[in-house]
Amino acid sequence: MPSRGRVRLGLALAAFFGAVLALGALGAGVGEVAAGDPDVWWVAAAGRLGSWVAPLATNTFSFTAPDRPWVFHEHLAGPFYAFGLEHGGTSFLSMLSLVGLLGTAALVLFAATRWQRPNAHELFAGWCLALVWCLAVGLHGMNARVTILARLLPLGFVLLGFGERFERRHALALVGLGTIWANLHGSFPLGPVILVAAGFEGHRRARWATALLCGLASFVTPHGLALHTLVYDYLVGGAATLDVVHTYVREFQPLWAVDPLTIVPELIALVIVSTIALLGLRSHPARTLLLLALVVLATRNQRHLPLVLLLAVPLLRPVLASWVPSWQGAARPALAVAFLPAFVLGGFAWLKSPAPEARGGAVVDALVARLPEGTKLYVPIDLGGRVAWAAHPRVHVFADPRNDCYPADVLREAYELGRPGQDPAWIRETLAARDVTHVLERAGSDVARALDAWRFVVREGEWVLLESPDAMALNRRASGTSGPPARRARR
């Protein structure tokens, strides 16, 4: 029987975990973060035009590079997102972020407390690592991107690949997961790497053969070798377009390029798991080397940081177990204390909250609805996907957050136009060179103020819609009238 003190300790750890997770679930249920995410909209827009079998293959949403080839590496999620947004609106996004957060937390708790029949030391170590994950990631797991679902796959690979037993059913499950992973997200090469590392701890031939089969299964996609080429370019750099992405997109930048005050919990957690991995190199070399390699990758590319902290729970549990005291009980009550408050609070928030909106999305949708057929629209790049969802094919955008399907010069211009302090003459020349007919910008932005010769169409809230002089002349010729003079307004 466990001592009363240990039971209280277990319940206290679980309550702390549950409180943090509940706050994250509350944010996910409300859904403003998910609705304001720039990526979910272009995934849905591409899914509406493509399918699971034949996904969209060219950059059809943009007028700057409409025929440029595009490898839609998240194509398996596209039709799902399109269906959800069409039938559930932005409430679908909040539901997806909530399900993704709670599903990840459930697997974390499984990896911490139930996986591989843990002994008393491993149970306490698992709870400690679960708390590290929850404090660093749980409050930020509120977006609805494909990544929040795709992260479950590497966790599944670790749980199955590093299990005490490795039978045919485990191999078949991993090959199936690997095939899904290759069609869902570009991080799929990590799967075979996990299995290769697991092979050094036992069942070497079976695990390495499964790794090979997973590698072969990754070619069972509509893109074939092009998908692997894209992943390679993202990993090592060198491609001109991806160099622009790594320069301007924060999540692709190294940790040392980020203000450390903005990611304090993540940095503390990274130091903790890195220290445990380094100290466990001699006793558990395969799993600790795997985690340290992921730490290096996250240091170079901060978007991988949540993945490192997630996989640290099952990978480092046996390492940490040799240093911490044993803890014998209260596992089931502790699981309920940790998980149920988040489930109840997040579900209640989702049911009672109105359909979420963020970043003026409804206003942008209303203004885009006023645009004529054939519009070539400049809009800040983070809203390009939302415009593609709301108005394609009537409106084409300058650029959108898919970014890897644009030439480097177009993508660089899109990011530079969104940066403050640009020369007004350069703004006008760039938009004229790209034959932009309309601009939708925040009032008072450098772009809006630079276009003093453009016609002011309408202003809603913080947004202003402008029409180019060439578009005005074309409309006058089409209507056979001289038209009103351009209206000027404060911007």
Image (cartoon, rainbow, N blue to C red):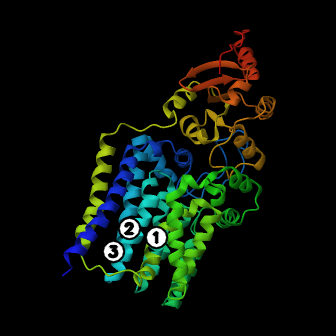
| Amino acid at dot 3 | Thr
State the SS at label 1.
helix
State the SS at label 2.
helix
User: Are the residues at dot 2 and dot 1 in contact (C-beta closer than 8 Å)?
Assistant: yes
Q: CA distance from mark 3 to mark 2?
A: 10 Å
Locate residue 14, reporting x and y percent.
30, 65
Left or right of 283, for residue 108: left
Which labelled disc corresponds to residue 200? none
- Identify whether 383 is placed above or below 369: below
Q: Along the line of sight, which residue is nearer the eye, 135 or 483? A: 135
Q: Quadrant of the rendered structure where residue 190 is? A: bottom right
| Amino acid at dot 1 | Leu
Which one is in front in this view, the residue at disc 3 or the one at disc 1? 3
**Lower sequence index among marks 3 and 2:** 2
Residue displayed at 48% across by 37% down = 358
Which one is in front in this view, the residue at disc 3 or the one at disc 2? 3
Which labelled disc corresponds to residue 113? 3
| Residue tagged 1 | 155
Q: Along the line of sight, which residue is nearer the eye, 217 or 349? A: 349
